[in-house]
Amino acid sequence: MLVIPNSRSLRVRDLLLLPDRWSLPSDIYIFASPPPSRKLSLQTRRAAPRVRSSANLTYRFRDLLALEPLSADELTFILDQAKPFQEIQRHPLKKLATLRGKTVALAFFENSTRTRLSFATAASRLGADTMNLQAEASSLKKGETLLDTANNLNAMRPDCFVMRHASSGAADFVARHLEIPVVNAGDGTHEHPSQGLLDALTIRDRVGHLNNLNVIILGDIAHSRVARSNIHLLGKFGCRFTLCGPAMWVPRELEKIGPPDTQIRCVYRVEEALEDADVIIVLRVQTERLNEPSLSQSDYILLYQLNAERMKLAKPDALILHPGPINRGMEITPEVADGPQSAVLEQVTNGVATRMAILYLLMVGASEGTHPALEVKPDAKSKESAHASD
Ligand code: NCD
């Protein structure tokens, strides 16, 4: 099935010019897994060592439950692994065979459009199949517990479990019971690690680096798992944060989250917050929560909406991110959301590459210097291991 005719490296372009993966000539090798000895376990479930070999970095993530426990090196490693997958998104033929024969369970106990589709697309572009559970149609509605549902899905033998749940800690809980890798696709108000990573990738691409940036997060921060993941990630690179929104959504306790020594300040006037901003992360106004303590939509627009006038207060090249879904005309004007400083759709594109990297790292493991989208070492041993891992 897979091919490497000789010892030259196979580049992304070569891979994608090959015909459909099912009709490849039988003597061709496309991918080799990293040698098993290189696979190391990095996890948040058990205390796992971050391992550095003298030659390069090697990681195998056990789960991806949160960004908080990961170091700047580990986060950089994941972002670097996403880079070659970004190139694949630009090519007309996007399918790889890295996870052929593997199955990714997508268990979304809470509604999602972008994140679920993005993981499904990532799995498919790596050659994996998916199993889908959607909250509305699931037996949860009939009273089944989270653990029973997870165990039942797991009994169908997926190789990875991607889950979203309305309760903080739900992914961690499931991970303690399953042997396969678990990816947290958003748990309550806790974390949304793949969103934090794709945001960082987008910032790194546009700004050129992640170091010491002034990051403004605007909106309902108290309820936002996206804000937390962003703070845990960007804080490791020395970024400073200004959290801005109505007082009930920006409690002062938030100044204490983030890595040690991270500068976080809460301000309640958007004009003050925007001064010197390098990156502005606009959060959705969760209309389902607007009638909590009273703040009308028109008041929110008046006081906090990101519009062209207010953007003049930020640095002229300040980057605008939004995790989606956007409420146009509410937290952000269409003019700003669609303007040149907005990277909203790049975030969505980068989401697929980031999630390909996550699935690859969890299900295969990776060594620095090797990448399925870049090159393959064609020898008998790697051919064997590619068969085994497929
Ligand atoms: C966010 C989420 O669900 O946490 N969206 C997303 O994953 N793209 C933010 C939100 O729902 O407002």
Image (cartoon, rainbow, N blue to C red):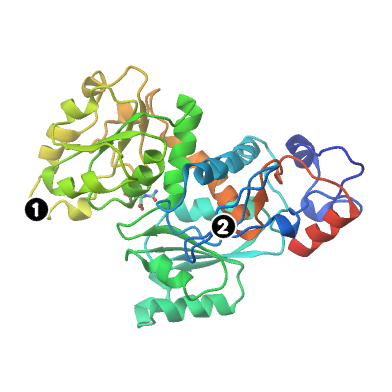
Q: In this view, does 297 lie to the left or right of 382?
A: left
Tag 2 secondary structure: loop
- Amino acid carrying label 2: it is Phe
Instruction: Please tell me which residue lies in front, 164 or 308.
Output: 164
The answer to whether the residue bearing label 2 lies less than 8 angstroms from the nearest atom of ligand 1 is: no
Q: Where is residue 106 in the image (x, y as percent from the top left)?
A: 51, 64
> Which image quadrant: the C terminus?
bottom right
Q: Position of residue 119 (x, y in %)?
A: 53, 54
Residue 285 lies, in percent from the top left, at 23, 45
Q: In which quadrant will I find the N terminus?
A: bottom right
Q: What residue does disc 2 label? A: 61
The amino acid type, in three-letter code, at marker 1 is Pro
**Label 1, label 2: how many angstroms apart (C-alpha)?**
41 Å
| Residue 287 visible from this viewpoint | yes
Q: How crowded is mark 2: few (under 14 residues within 10 Å), some or many (20 or more)?
A: many
Q: Which residue is drawn at 71% across and 44% down?
A: 370
Q: State the residue at coordinates (23%, 41%).
A: 219
Task: Check disc 1 and report the residue beneath it.
Answer: 293
| Residue 39: assigned label | none
Q: Residue at x 36, y 65 (%)?
A: 169
How busy is the neighbourhood of tag 1: few (under 14 within 10 Å), some, or many (20 plus)? few
Front-most of residues 146 and 111: 146
Residue 360 screen position, x and y as percent? 63, 53
Q: Disc 1 vs disc 2: which is toward the camera?
A: 2
